[in-house]
Amino acid sequence: MTDTELVFDDGLLPALAQDVESGRALMLAYVSPDAVSRTQETGLAHYYSRSRGELWQKGQTSGNVQHVEDIRVDCDGDALLYLVRQEGGACHTGHESCFYRSVDDVSIDNSNQGDEADASSVTVATTNIGEQVYDPETVYK
């Protein structure tokens, strides 16, 4: 066993949840040191909500929890991979995965920028390829 230091950018780092059986990417969220520790302690995925400014357990409201089989760290120590067994849908929109849209076209408007476009000036045309597995209207009342 070797020690690897995690590199948190502004106290957070990205964690990708991947289905342990299918290999499908389910969602991307951010974790704080406490979220990583709680995940490792409980075996349930914990993340840090940037919008609410708090630690949260995936599925605490919806019941769509993630049982974490393994936590992997990338070569730079600045991203994690949660290998999970997902109960229900992973996405708050009711879809099985947050990655339920395929990009068909990319449009960049850099008329107000220099040589490089700001991320807010990129628009993508998408096609819905995912399955909605629950109704978020009934879950998040």
Image (spheres, grey):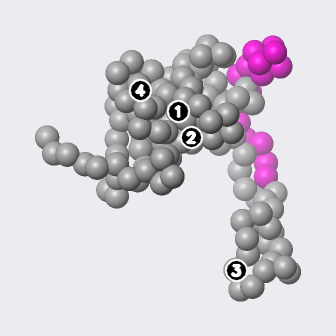
Residue 83 image-quadrant placement: top left
Task: Point out residue 133 in the picture as x, y percentages from the top left corner.
Answer: 71, 22
Q: Which residue is mark 2?
A: 29
Binning the other alpha carbons within 10 Å of mark 4 as few (below 14), some (14 to 19) or many (20 upward) gives many
Task: Point out residue 90 in the picture as x, y percentages from the top left corner.
Answer: 61, 28
> Which numbered marker is on residue 47?
1
Q: Which residue is mark 3?
A: 116
- Choose the circle earlier in sequence order: 1 or 2: 2
Callout 4, which amino acid?
A: Thr
Callout 1, which amino acid?
A: Tyr
Binning the other alpha carbons within 10 Å of mark 1 as few (below 14), some (14 to 19) or many (20 upward) gives many
Residue at the location (41% across, 25% down)? 38
Task: Point out residue 35 in the picture as x, y percentages from the top left corner.
Answer: 46, 31
Above-or-below relation of 100 to 38: below
Q: Which residue is mark 4?
A: 39
Residue 24 showing in the rendered view: no
Alpha carbon separation for disc pair 3 and 4? 38 Å
The reply to whether callout 3 and callout 4 are in contact (CB within 8 Å) is no
